[in-house]
Image (cartoon, grey):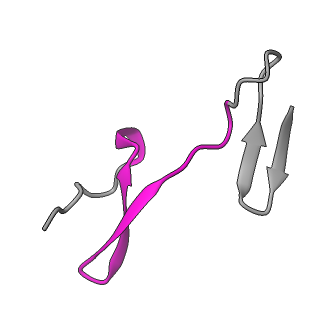
Amino acid sequence: MDTMTIIGRYGVDRTGMQIKHFNLIIQWQNGKKEVVWPEELRTAKPVFK
């Protein structure tokens, strides 16, 4: 299955394993929204204070 939903693309393979939708972790850094995880989509390193 491969479909578009209101929260983005979603899909599963023949075994039911989710393969198309995953979560992103973002942070506001210097007034800009940055993706900090997953690493392959990261736009900035995470900041810990």
Task: Kindly indicate the quadrant of the structure image that contains residue 47.
Answer: bottom left
Looking at the picture, does residue 19 appear above or below residue 35?
above
Foreground of the two, 42 or 22: 22
Looking at the picture, does residue 12 appear above or below residue 45?
above
The magenta region covers 19-41
Q: Where residue 20 appears, x then y in whole percent?
A: 68, 37
Q: Is residue 27 magenta?
A: yes
Relative to 6, is 44 on the left or the right? left
Residue drawn at the location 73% of the way across and 48% of the way down: 9
Residue drawn at the location 30% of the way across and 84% of the way down: 31
Q: Where residue 43 appears, x then y in whole percent?
A: 33, 56
Q: In which quadrant is the C terminus drawn?
A: bottom left
Which residue reaches farthest bottom? 31
Residue drawn at the location 66% of the way across and 43% of the way down: 21
Relative to 46, is 40 on the left or the right? right
Relative to 42, is 23 on the left or the right? right
Q: Where residue 33 appears, x then y in whole percent?
A: 39, 72
Q: In which quadrant is the N terminus drawn?
A: top right
